[in-house]
Image (cartoon, grey):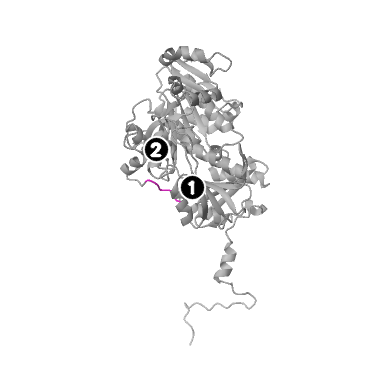
Amino acid sequence: MAAPANRPKPVRRSKSVPMADTTLETLLSQLGNGIVDLGDKSIVSERPIHGTTLFVATCSVESRMGLFQAHVFQDLIHKGYIIALAQGNLRARTLYTRIHSSCVTSETLRGCDCDCVQQLEGALEVIAKKGNGILFYLMQEGRGVGYVAKARDRMLVQASSDRISTFQAYAAMGLKKDYRNYEDVAHVCHLLGLRKTGFVLLTNNPDKISAMSAAGLKVIRAEPLEFEPSPFNLAYLTSKAASGHILKRPSDQALKPALPPEPVVPFQPHALAEASRFIYAASYFLPVKPVDSEILISEAQFKAHQSDLERHMTGSMPLVKDCYLIRDHRFIVQLNRDRFARYREEHPDDPLVSLLTAPYWFRVHVYYDIVTGHEFVLLTYNKPKIYDLPILRLQSESLFNRFPLANMDNRDKFKRSVRHIVHYGVGAICLLYFDGRGAGFGAHATDRMLTERGGAHSSDEAYRKLGISYDSRDYDACFLLLRHHVPNARVQMIMNSPSSLVKKTEYAAALNKHGLEVEKWIFLDDHAIAD
């Protein structure tokens, strides 16, 4: 009897074709061992994954503490980057290490309302001194809640005049005190072959010790990293000490917390009428470290302390280098930083000390973009009057520039921009988080790896291999947000150089689209300035 026509014919296997080995052991060997071979040239193409963590790139980072190797990873779920910044022998039995959460306000914007940048740089100094160590830099802003929630916390705390703590603010907003997750650190240790390494953890936070141990990592001991509080971070450090951090100095201080120059009024998040993709989420004051030891004082303050200032400008070791009048009846006092630091230790109760340690108060505005999922951060300095020509700056950021690099060019550009704005008296800075000219930090790190390892002769060639264009930053969004806070059509713009303006055709198009008429271009030179 014939087989039905629709019945499939049996597949006949050729005796010359072997059956595939589908045993788990063989399949896992084909999958790879999930270890990054840092010495192999194929590192420019191989991308091991372990757990949810993908290896992206490795490249060198020249810091003030010496040469480090940055091993860059990305979490495949929340998309955050992890930078393992290592120095010395990673195969050593013991590594000094820090698990550090990102803090854009202190590490990029020069904010002095926390101790995060001191913790970061202090840890790197210890690692360099010890010779073998690794710092895990995690994109976990605001104890893991992100900058939108962190900014709303700061807004609420400032609105209360520091009567509530950061932890109370989190609770009031329906948040836990800490959302950080350290599973990526364990994945990175696996990928780098550090599962059996012993770690000396540089931290004041007992929760990090528990988290590392829970992840199967061996913590030998913890060593604290504590720094002298200031009036601008005292309330923050006091609240951390109350929550269980091992901090002794906040309780020993006779300092009084410094309050913002104006009242802060909290508000509900709302969409912008002119572009509802942007949710205006928070606004608060950020105390920014003075630039080049230049302290800003009012005319009334100058008159009240004129004789003291003149006295400290004379003698063989003057504390004050210069004092001069700037726009809108304000004065700049330029300090001899080292001598003033000694004077402050010896005369902590001198009223002149509190006057000459004042920061620049910028207002931070934080937006969430529901289209891209990005956060946009703007700094504004005073409200422009109708006759003002506000100074505007788009400040591109690289995550690597959050570290204390030997080449401080990017930080210098930000400082010079702040200085121009403060001297003029009104302006704004929009922070462009987008590394690699908008392509992202992964692209930037891969570009550096390719050029260092011979995979590309230049960044332009690396970008072609990555398949990305020269510039993909969202200038249109930046200028839209700037116009929301700086309604003046006639402005001054800060740019790196005339050539950078020529290259950025999208930049010029966005200026025109939003009706901004540039009365003056301020081009930043190549000369670094003091911190």
Residue 304 at least partly seen: yes
Q: Is disc 2 placed on a helix, strand or loop?
A: helix
Q: Is disc 1 placed on a helix, strand or loop?
A: loop
Badge 1 crowding class, 10 Å Cα cut-off, few under 14, some 14 to 19, many 20 or more, is some
Magenta stretch: residue 31 in it? no
Tell me, for residue 267, which label it has, or none.
none
User: Seen from this angle, which residue lies furthest bottom?
Assistant: 1
Q: Residue at x 51, y 51 (%)?
A: 221
Front disc: 2 or 1: 2
Badge 2 crowding class, 10 Å Cα cut-off, few under 14, some 14 to 19, many 20 or more, is some
Say which of 510 and 89 sits in front: 89
- Pick the quarter of the image with the C terminus: top right
Amino acid carrying mark 1 in the image: Gly
Say which of 190 and 453 sits in front: 190
- First to last magenta residue range: 177-181
Look at the picture and state if 17 lies above or below 500: below
Look at the picture and state if 176 lies above or below 216: above
Say which of 207 and 400 sits in front: 207
Tell me, for residue 238, which label it has, or none.
2
Look at the picture and state if 8 lies above or below 467: below
- The residue tagged 1 is 80
